[in-house]
Amino acid sequence: MKKLVEVQNDDVPPRLVLILGGARSGKSTFAERLALESERRVAFIATATASDDDMRDRIARHQAARPAHWQTIEEPLHLATAVRQAAEHADVILLDCLTVWLSNWLFAQHDSDAPFDEQMISAGYYDAALQEIAELLQVASTFAPGKTLLCVSNEVGLGIVPAYALGRVYRDVLGLVNQRVATAAARVYLMVAGLGVDIKRLHETATL
């Protein structure tokens, strides 16, 4: 795999890269390899929380796989603040992942004793979540040359329509989040069986 600066074909690495894919597609491994091979200072922003035994095991495996000298910031909700903090000391900020962040964010907005239904969409969930992403992108847009934000996210819209309201709200909001980040990103990689395809480059060169 080429180094991040070489993938860009430029002397200055990209400010924003999105790594997108399904479960177990190799997203995190690909993002970590890009960060490692950049040979720059790396900060890792972890959005997951140890909510059950399975998540604790997943977190432990990811921690063991990362280089010990990387700075780690655990932040389940406030992405823009975490990225701003990380950029003070690191050149590559790896945010893993937007998928888990959105789950955390949705539950933080919702009264757990109230029923969750799709009427919440009209209550501003879409706009509020996208505002959080706008703040994240604004921080990335102010990076000094040489700093890069790598965002990992899931593509959850390729399967069946979720049977429950929360799943439908989550799928739809995440789809919009991914679109916003992809639009702002210099590179968008779609992971398929561990292989990263630069779909933004294909999109830019596509013709009838």
Image (tube, rainbow, N blue to C red):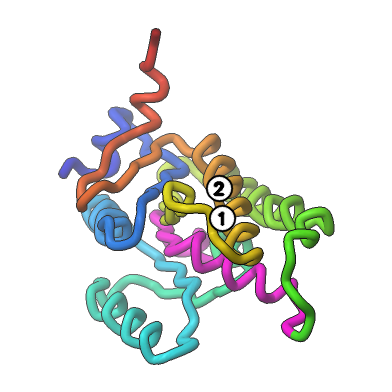
Which residue of the protein is positioned furthest toward the front in this rendering? 163
Q: Is residue 17 visible?
A: yes
| Amino acid identity at mark 1 | Arg
Quarter occupied by the N terminus: top left
Along the line of sight, which residue is nearer the eye, 7 or 172? 172
As drawn, the label of residue 207 is none
Q: Quadrant of the C terminus?
A: top left
Residue where numbered disc 1 is placed: 171
Q: Is residue 95 magenta?
A: yes
Viewer can see residue 151: no
Where residue 108 appears, as percent x and y from the top left, is: 69, 75
Name the quadrant containing residue 154: bottom left
Q: CA distance from mark 2 to mark 1?
A: 6 Å
Mark 2 vs mark 1: give the one in front: 1
Locate residue 74, reporting x and y percent.
49, 77
Q: Are marks 2 and 1 in contact (CB under 8 Å)?
A: yes
Q: Residue at x 40, y 65 (%)?
A: 43
Q: Amino acid at mark 2?
A: Gly
Residue span colored magenta: 84-112
Identify the residue at horizontal 60%, vertical 66% (top origin): 164
Label 1 environment density (alpha carbons within 10 Å; few <14, some 14–19, many ≥20): many
Q: Is residue 205 left or right of residue 137?
A: left
Mark 1 falls on what kind of element?
helix
Mark seen at residue 175:
2
**Residue 17 on the magenta segment:** no
Outermost residue toward the right?
123
